Amino acid sequence: MEDISHHDMEKEVPTAGHDTIPKEVESTNCSITSASASVLDEDKELECPKSDPEECDTEEQEEKHNQLNASQPPVELSKRQRKKLLKLENWEKKKKEKRLKEKEKMRAKRIEAVRQGLPVRNGPSRKELKRRKLSYADATIEIAVDLSFDQMMIDKDVAKCVKQLLRIYTLNRRSERPIPLHFVGIEKGGAVERHLARNDGYQHWDVRFSSEHFMHLFKPSNLVYLTSESDNVLDRLETGCVYVIGGLVDHNQHKGHCYQLAQKHGIRHARLPLAEHLVIKTRTILTINQVFEILHNVHMGKEWQPTLLKVLPARKGVTPKPLEVANDDQSMRTI
């Protein structure tokens, strides 16, 4: 340790570990006590390894270094980015609490329903749903959602995409005739996988997850890519086909991309028969879960027109076409 006397401030006098400090040194303002010196020494030992003490800078050198780099501040997040990050962190913390409150609320509703003699549930129980397993071997059709568009979506749109996947899974799980589902093209460590991981236990869904491209998972002859730009009209669901839904939420920024993919890979493509059954005043772009719900209802044996009227939101201002006109259009344009 080093003691600096007020009689000779410029000269350093090495000492061998004092247990006591002289009173004349203690009385001056420019002396350093042994306790504070030991703390400084400990800080120096933590900051630099003993094997190479020359790497440690003194306080003066660090101060000069900071002054030199003052003109080059570290990259910082913008105010908007910090706000979004804080909001996301707060949501993750409150997510489990919110779910617990929802469970308590549902439990209270069930107790009240039992007390009043009302039906407790509208659908199958959770135990029954867990026992249900999809039979891929006996399936007449299969549906694959192409999720290989990580780089084409902002994080907000990826979150919307994953929410639509949740709706698909929930609808299919509660169906009397569930359709084999494939979520394919998931980039490892990508945005879709990250947002999926926020749902505890998603790996145990009755869905086949894959990072492989759909062209490597299915026979090309069985694939039909659904895209609104196609000239082919999907008037019926063919047995043995795998219908591919593009998992791209881009607000029509990449118009025609899925159509171009189908052409690039040389596979069949088709569009839903919206114009053949409805009069639509707005765009015919549908969400992933809406396309799935339409296919699911038709798979259940329902007709196209009532299915489309039920699934499409009222804001699109759709009205049914007369059956005669719809039948004529459907006979002229088939897949």
Image (cartoon, rainbow, N blue to C red):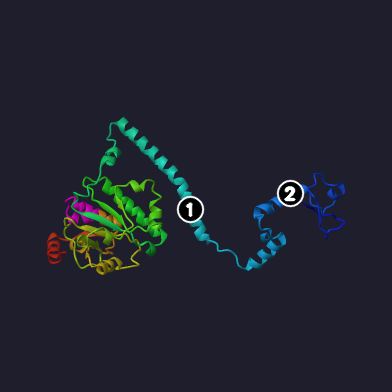
Q: Is residue 38 visible?
A: yes
The location of residue 24, given as percent across then percent down, is: 87, 49
Q: Residue at 46% across / 49% down in the picture?
A: 91
Q: Give the range drawn in magenta.
A: 293-313
What's the amino acid at mark 2? Ser
* The image quarter in which residue 52 lies: bottom right
What's the amino acid at mark 1? Lys
- Compare marks 2 and 1 and give the one earlier in the sequence: 2
Give left or right: position of 87 versus 111: right
In the rendered image, the residue lying farthest to the top is: 115
Task: Give the mark toward the camera: 2 or 1.
Answer: 2
Give left or right: position of 232 versus 204: left
Which residue position is annotated with label 2?
38
Which residue position is annotated with label 1?
87
Is 106 situated above or below 167? Answer: above
39 or 145: which is nearer to us? 39
In the rendered image, the residue lying farthest to the front is: 51
Residue 127 part of the magenta-drawn span = no
Which labelled disc corresponds to residue 54? none
188 or 150: which is nearer to us? 188
Q: In which quarter of the image is the C terminus?
A: bottom left
Q: Callout 1: 10 Å neighbours few (<14), some, many (20+)?
A: few
Q: Residue at 29% across / 57% down in the picture?
A: 145
